[in-house]
Image: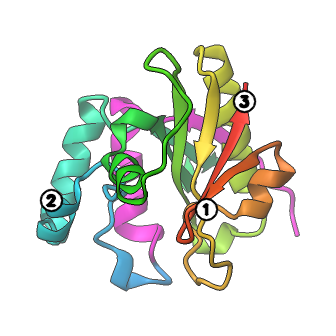
Amino acid sequence: MEKLEITIRALCPNNCEDWLEYFDKVAFEDHGEWGACYCLEGYLDQETREKMTDPKERREKADEMIKAGEMKGYLAYSGNTVVGWCNANDREKYKYVTEMFQKVGYQTKDTAETKVKSIFCFLIAPKYRGRGIAKRLLDRVCEDAAKDGYFGVEAYPFSDKGLEYQYHGTSEMYERNGFEEMADLKYVKIMRKDL
């Protein structure tokens, strides 16, 4: 297998069109039924998630959030082609995470001053999976989080390793990269790497 030259770039308004094209044409070419995702799940409260099912509406919302700097993350490029994506942002930006913590009664030990970066998902192009792109994205998230004054990086892999969709990343990947399990909420685990 040829070695891939990968460049990681932070998502910003300037590469929003690359991101949209990736989600429109590549990201779900093996699972068209997930094509309306547009990586909004983490950002929306449960009521909005249940109501906002139209792909066009979701695409417009994602476009708006990227251009406003509200959706953050990293794109992996091979040449000029996007081959991977990691949704990573301040933990407080993810309504899904806040709701999940409240629902199960999980109390974080962080204070209001503690900045925590959360990794919500990875999405690697089908033809590029198994080639270390998720790890490259993970490394970049952690490097930038340390530079930006975050106290830690958190992730939420599914507890059930048999699920076909492991878009939160796997607990094994996080463990190999210095994350520790903080809690098992039965549905997802909370993994943390202190910086």
Q: Is residue 153 above or below residue 58?
A: above
Could you tell me if the residues under marks 2 and 3 are in contact, i.e. CB atoms within 8 Å? no
Among numbered discs 2 and 3, the one appearing first in the sequence: 2
Depth check: 176 or 62 in front? 176
Instruction: Magenta stretch: give its range.
Output: 1-28
Q: Amino acid at mark 1?
A: Pro
Disc 2 on helix, strand or loop? Answer: helix
Depth check: 95 or 31 in front? 95
| CA neighbours of label 2 inside 10 A, class few (<14), some (14 to 19), many (20+) | few
Among numbered discs 3 and 1, the one appearing first in the sequence: 1
**Residue matched to label 3:** 194
Decide if residue 6 is in sight here.
no
Q: Is residue 74 above or below residue 110?
A: below
Disc 3 on helix, strand or loop? Answer: strand
Corner quadrant of residue 179: top right
24 inside magenta stretch = yes
Q: Residue at x 88, y 70 (%)?
A: 1
133 inside magenta stretch = no
Q: Residue at x 76, y 69 (%)?
A: 130
Point out the image quarter for the C terminus.
top right
Among numbered discs 1 and 2, the one appearing first in the sequence: 2
- Residues under labels 2 and 3: Cα distance? 32 Å
Q: Residue 183, how many percent across, how many down?
A: 64, 54
**Residue matched to label 2:** 48
Depth check: 46 or 40 in front? 46
| CA neighbours of label 1 inside 10 A, class few (<14), some (14 to 19), many (20+) | many
Corner quadrant of residue 68: top left
- Residues under labels 3 and 1: Cα distance? 17 Å
**Residue matched to label 1:** 157
Q: Is residue 87 above or below residue 152?
A: below
Per the rendering, the mark at residue 117 is none
Q: Amino acid at mark 3?
A: Asp
